[in-house]
Image: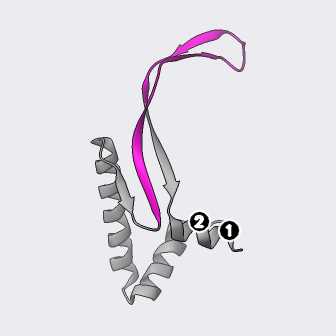
Amino acid sequence: MSVNRTELVSKIAERANLTKAQADAALGAFQDVLVESLAQGEAVKVTGLFSAERVERAARTGRNPRTGEEMQIPAGFGVKLSAGSSLKKAVSSK
């Protein structure tokens, strides 16, 4: 089971005593700041919850899964997410 954006907004609104519109705006702003920061190469750390950083991926040789033909995959960037202590604790205790 997963929580979608609508359900997440509802839960945030209830816990923070906000309207759903305010909670949606706050979540949207968080998303925008996270994406912009990572795009600029800045790490984002929310103590206890998670940290996210942009990492470089080297160019490499891969295979086309349909044909088995070798192909060159260009260098690029990815995102590394690490769980914070409170998140790790919450997940491991259940």
Relative to 17, residue 50 above or below:
above
Residue sitting at 29 percent across and 46 percent down?
Answer: 42
Tell me where residue 67 appears, x and y as whole percent.
72, 13
Checking the image for residue 92, the label placed there is: 1
Residue type highlighted by circle 2: Lys
> In this picture, which residue range is highlighted in magenta?
49-76
Q: Does 39 sit left or right of 68 as displayed?
A: left
Residue type highlighted by circle 1: Ser
Residue sitting at 53 percent across and 17 percent down?
Answer: 60
- The residue that label 2 is drawn on is 88
| Spatial separation of the CA atoms under disc 2 and disc 1 | 6 Å
* Depth order, front residue of 53/3: 53
Tell me where residue 22 appears, x and y as whole percent.
33, 78
Task: Please say if the residues under marks 2 and 1 sit with CB atoms less than 8 Å apart.
Answer: yes
Q: Quadrant of residue 24?
A: bottom left
Q: Does 87 sit left or right of 41 as displayed?
A: right
Relative to 72, residue 41 above or below:
below
The N terminus: image quadrant: bottom right
> For numbered disc 2, what is the local secondary structure?
helix
Checking the image for residue 51, the label placed there is: none
